[in-house]
Amino acid sequence: MAKDRAHQALYDGIAQIYDPWSRSVVEDVDFYVEQAVASGGPVVELAVGTGRIAVPVAKAGIAVIGVDESPEMLAGARAYAESEGVSDLLELRQGDLREPPVTERVPLVVIPFRSLLHMPDETEKRRAIAAAASLLEPGGRFVFDVFAPNAEDIEETDGIWLEREPGIFERADWDERARTLTLSVRSAEQSASFTLHWLSAPEWNALIEDAGLVAEELYGWFDRRPYEGGEDQIWVCRPQH
């Protein structure tokens, strides 16, 4: 996930358990790989983390520029790319997704795994979306996914430590009024806590338009089913002009 400067140390702190913690999250990988292949590349991935998406994209033959603020997460991505033999297709750069260290213009920019929810307010979300838009070549696409919880999610998980993966526990503390999720992760050796800030689909659409983009598609899941008001939102955007 993405992180502003206040969250950098936290992600460094769980870098060693990030992959085991997110091991079961695979539903989005093929979707982003397909988007990358269709674009022809290269692709910029903001909040690249340990390369969970970027390395499979590189294995599909598409060059990736991956940006993340956490040096520990980037070290994980570098090791992953080396182990898969795709280091030559994955260039990693340390930086903030709101001010990415990228001068190239590309046909596809992605922010997977709900990383935009780390932006604490609409101003910072708008900055991040505008930064992504600024990297697009004419006719390019910006793709990201976010969520807004339903009542069942909140009821089933609020304030409860759950064993997400063997030896790795996760706790969700929801604040519906503030529309925040404080997510805590811990293992025997490492722990971190960070806050996600969600919005409704119309609010996201307004930010997209403010950034000079238009929503070309809004899916309700990674199988491209239409969005019908559920918790997951997968946006495919293009420049307005």
Image (cartoon, helix red, strand yellow):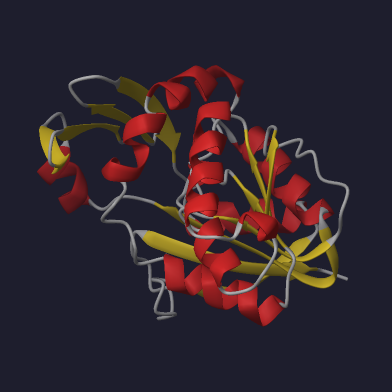
* Residue at the (57%, 32%) spot, across then down: 121
The residue lying toward the viewer, choosing from 209 and 51, is 51
Q: Quadrant of residue 239?
A: bottom right
On screen, residue 179 versus residue 1, left or right, reads left
* Residue at the (40%, 81%) spot, across then down: 225
Q: Is residue 161 above or below residue 57?
A: above
Relative image position of residue 81 (x, y in whole percent): 54, 53
On screen, residue 58 versus residue 157, left or right, reads right
* Residue at the (20%, 26%) spot, across then down: 187
* Residue at the (42%, 35%) spot, across then down: 196
On screen, residue 204 versus residue 200, left or right, reads right
Query: Can residue 67 be seen in the rendering of this structure?
Result: yes
Q: Quadrant of the C terminus?
A: bottom right
Q: Quadrant of residue 69?
A: top right
Query: Can residue 219 be seen in the rendering of this structure?
Result: no
Relative image position of residue 11 (x, y in whole percent): 45, 27
Q: Is residue 228 above or below residue 95?
A: below
Q: Give the tally of numbered discs.
A: 0
The residue lying toward the viewer, choosing from 164 and 240, is 164
Q: Is residue 123 above or below residue 79?
A: above
Relative image position of residue 27 (x, y in whole percent): 35, 67
Q: Quadrant of residue 181?
A: top left
Relative image position of residue 33 (x, y in whole percent): 53, 72
